[in-house]
Image (spheres, rainbow, N blue to C red):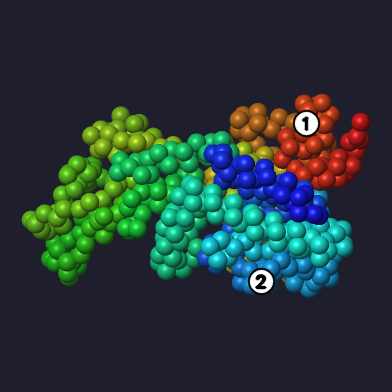
Amino acid sequence: MNPPSLLAALLPLMADLAQDLPEAERHRRLLETLRVLLPCDATAMLRLDGDWLVPLAVNGLSGDTLGRRFRVAEHPRFVELLEAPGPVRFAADCGLPDPFDGLVEGVQGHLPVHDCMGCALQVDGRPWGVLTLDALEIGRFSRVELDVLQAFASLAAATVALATRMHGLAERAEDERLRADSYAQAAGHRPRQLIGHSAAHKRLLREIALAGPTDLCVLIQGETGTGKELVAQALHAASPRAKKPLVSINCAALPDSLVESELFGHVRGAFTGAVGDRRGKFELADGGTLFLDEVAELPLQVQAKLLRVLQGGQLQRLGSDREHRVDVRVIAASNRNLADEVRAGRLRADFYHRLSVYPLQVPPLRERGRDVLPIGGFFLEEARSRMGLGAVRLDAGAQAALLAYDWPGNVRELEHLLGRSVVKALGRHAQRPRILTLGADDLGLGVTGMASDAAREARPDLAAAVQAKGLGLRDAVADLERRMVLHALAQNDNQWAAAARALQVDPANLARMAKRLGVARA
C-alpha cells in the first residue's frame, strides 16, 4: 500500500481527536481502520498494565475476550512483541501458543495453522500496549504489510498519546498503577475491576464518576453478589483520597462484643484479653475511606456511637476518656432495603439518613444483558491461569446458556459456576487438552434458570425455542442465531454490512455464520 492510501485511511482517526469520543469508541474505530489497511480475520488492541495486557478493543474475537486479562509472562508471543524493535510476523507453523486460541469467531476448537503478526505501541518512549492481527489464510501477510503496520502503529500511538493528554488519563493511569501496586502487595494478586458495556452498567459508572470525587457518604445497595465492594473501591479510586488507605470491614462477620473495639479501638484493660492499646478501623482509615459492608447488621447502640463520628469526626477508644479526631469518608453497603429496616425498628432513622447522603443502586446481573460474557471471560482467564491451562473457551451453546440464565446469585454465582465448570470439564479428559472447551452441559444450567419474566422478555425467541417440544439446546441456539440474522437483514434493507454492525460481528464472520445456518444472500 502506498503512503497516500495510508494517510487517507488515517485521516478519520486524526479528525476523531477533535471529537469528545468515549475511549472504547476511539479504540474501536482504530481497529476498523486497521482492518481496512490490512484485511484479516481478527484484530485486538491491548494496553499494558504492569505485568498484564488488558484488551481495550477487539474485532473478530469472541465477546468474552474483553473481560480477560493476559499475564505477559504466560504468553510468549506477547513477550516477543513487546521486546521486538518493530513489527513481528510469526511463521504460520510457529510453535508458540496463540493467546487467542479458541477465541476467534467462526472457528471451532483450536486455531489451525494461520498467519499472525503484531507490534508494540510506544508512547513517550515506553511500551504502551500491543496490536495483533490474525488471518486464517496462510500467506496473507508479507514484508510489505510489516512496513504498513509499523507506519500505522507509529501514527496510532501518536493519537493515543494525544488523546491521553487531552483527557488527563496520564495522571489517573499513574494513580491506578500506584493503587494496583499497593493492592498487589497487600493481597498478593491483581485487584479486580468493574467490567461491562451494558446501559445499566454505564449508568452505574456515571454515578461513580459523580459521587467519587466528593466527600459525601455513599450508600451502596444491591442484591448479594452484585459487586458492591468493587463499587466502593471504584469510588475510593475516583476520590482525592485515592492515595490514602481504603479500609474495609464486614459488619455481619463481627460478634456484638467486638464491634466497638473493631471500629473505634480500645485501650489496655478495657476488657478481658485487651493486653495493649489498639487502633480501630476509623483511625486506620484516617485521611482515607472506610467501607462498612453489610452495615444493617450493626447493633442499635453502635449505630448511635457511629453518628457522632460521622457528624464531627470524633471518637473514643473503648475504655478511654480521651477523644481522637479522624478525617474519614464513609461508604456503606447493604443487600437489604434500609428504608424497610428503619420502619421495622432495626435501623435508626438518623443513622440511615446520615449514611444515604448519596444512595447508589448496583444493578443485578440479569439486568446487564451481554455483560455476562466479558465478566465470564475474566473469571475463565483467572481459572486458566490458576490451574495452569493453555486456553479455556465457551462454545456457542455455553454462551447462550449464560445469556439465558437468570443469575439469582449475580456475579458471585457466575464466578463460582465457571470455576466449578472448568474443573468438571477438565475431568472429562484423560490428558490436559490444548484448549479446554466448556459446553452447556458443563455449566449445568437447566431451562429452569430462565424463570425471570424480564429474562424471557429480553430473549423471547431463545426461551420459546428451548421450551419447544423436542428442541435441544444446540438446535435452539442455531434457531435463535438464524432468527437474529434474518431480523437484522430485514431491519437493514438486506444490507449485509449494516446487519453485521447491528449484530456486532465482523462481516466475514457473518457470512460464514449465514452459510452454516442456511441463510442465503439475496
Mark 2 neighbour class, 10 Å CA radius: few under 14, some 14 to 19, many 20 or more = few
The quadrant of the image that shows the N terminus is bottom right
Q: Secondary structure at mark 2?
A: loop
Q: In the image, is 358 to the left or to the right of 328?
A: right
Query: Could you tell me residue 492's position as x and y percent?
Result: 78, 28
Q: Secondary structure at mark 1?
A: helix
- The disc label shown at residue 68, or none: none
Relative to the observer, which residue lies in front, 245 or 398? 245
Instruction: Establish if 71 lies above or below 411.
Output: below
Query: Could you tell me residue 273's position as x and y percent?
Result: 19, 67
Please tell me which residue is depicted at 61% across the width and 30% down the height of the picture. Answer: 454
Mark toward the start of the polypeptide (2 vs 1): 2
Quarter-of-image position of residue 45: bottom right
Relative to the observer, which residue lies in front, 222 or 368? 368
Query: Could you tell me residue 416's position as x and y percent?
Result: 57, 54
Quote the CA–CA distance across marks 2 and 1.
Answer: 44 Å
The quadrant of the image that shows the C terminus is top right
Relative to the observer, which residue lies in front, 295 or 81? 81
What residue did someone put label 2 on? 85
- The disc label shown at residue 488, or none: 1
Instruction: Establish if 413 lies above or below 466.
Output: below
Count of labels in the image: 2
Mark 1 neighbour class, 10 Å CA radius: few under 14, some 14 to 19, many 20 or more = many
Q: For the residue marked with disc 1, what is the amino acid?
A: Ala
Please tell me which residue is depicted at 78% across the width and 69% down the height of the picture. Answer: 90
